[in-house]
Amino acid sequence: MTGAAIQSDQRASESDLPALMVRYQRGEPPAVEELVRRLSPALYRYLSFPRVPPADAEDLLQDCWLRIHRSRHTYRPQEPLLPWLYAIARHTRLDGYRRQRRRTSHEVLFADPPDVASRGRAEAPADSGDLLAMLEHLPASQREVMLMLKVSGMSLEEAARASSSTVGAIKQRAHRAYSKLRSLLEKPEKEKCPPKV
């Protein structure tokens, strides 16, 4: 299957999500179970990035579903569902980040940790070609746009609505992210080529 075929298949499977949400608003348990089953993997990926331990990401996912449940009455059936969901997920992730920052700001280090864990990690993103590792080099706003557009498959308009931004701003962040990722991908090739004499 080509990328376009996969994306159109994904869009077709997402077309019934608003109807499931309406059934969820009415309190139908099968609709709730189906929404959680279909949307949790994508929400988990969105909430677990960057450098979030799996246990914390699971907690964020649970918190996100609680927020969705509490605000389910605010969803309007004529609107796309994914931007509404990702706006909630975005606020959940930001609140989780703030909680984590408050927690770590009160921690006191008694001894310097060994430097073993940090060795070899600086070169890993460019050498391994691992997209998620490379995304860590992007600013948070660009990383968020890349996750929405490329990992979650949202359109520019949906990403703009989910991030309370404009389509132009989303395009700009995506362009800057592409440029940064391109430079990270080209970096090893330039290092491998000997200089021309």
Image (cartoon, grey):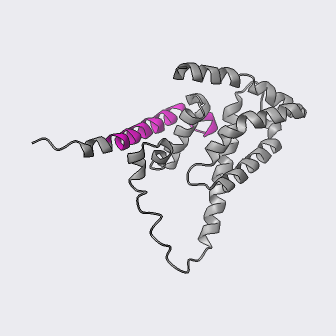
Q: Nearer the viewer, residue 76 or 24?
A: 24
Q: Is residue 166 above or below residue 88?
A: above
Q: Is residue 57 above or below residue 119?
A: above
Q: Is residue 176 magenta?
A: yes
What residue is shown at x 45% (from left), y 67% (from top)? 116
- Picture coordinates of residue 32 (x, y %)? 83, 35
In this image, 145 relative to 100: left or right? Answer: left
Seen in the image, is 2 located left or right of residue 77?
left
In the rendered image, the vertical position of residue 113 relative to residue 133, given as above or below: below
Residue positioned 58% across, 48% down in the render: 49
Secondary structure, magenta segment, majority class: helix
Q: Position of residue 104 (x, y in %)?
A: 61, 68
How many numbered discs sit on the rendered protein?
Answer: 0
- Image-quadrant location for residue 38: top right
Image position, residue 87 (x, y; %): 67, 41
Q: x and y percent of residue 61 in the render?
A: 72, 47
The single residue placed furthest to the bottom in the displayed view is 110
Residue 178 sits inside the magenta stretch: yes
Q: Residue at x 67, y 56 (%)?
A: 56
Q: Which residue occupies 67% across, 48% down?
A: 91
**Quarter of the figure with the C terminus:** top left
Image quadrant where one finds the N terminus = top right
Residue 88 in sight in this render: yes
Extreme residue toward the left, this view? 197
Residue 4 versus residue 43 in the image, above or below: above
> Residue 166: in sight, yes or no?
no
Q: Which residues are magenta?
A: 161-186
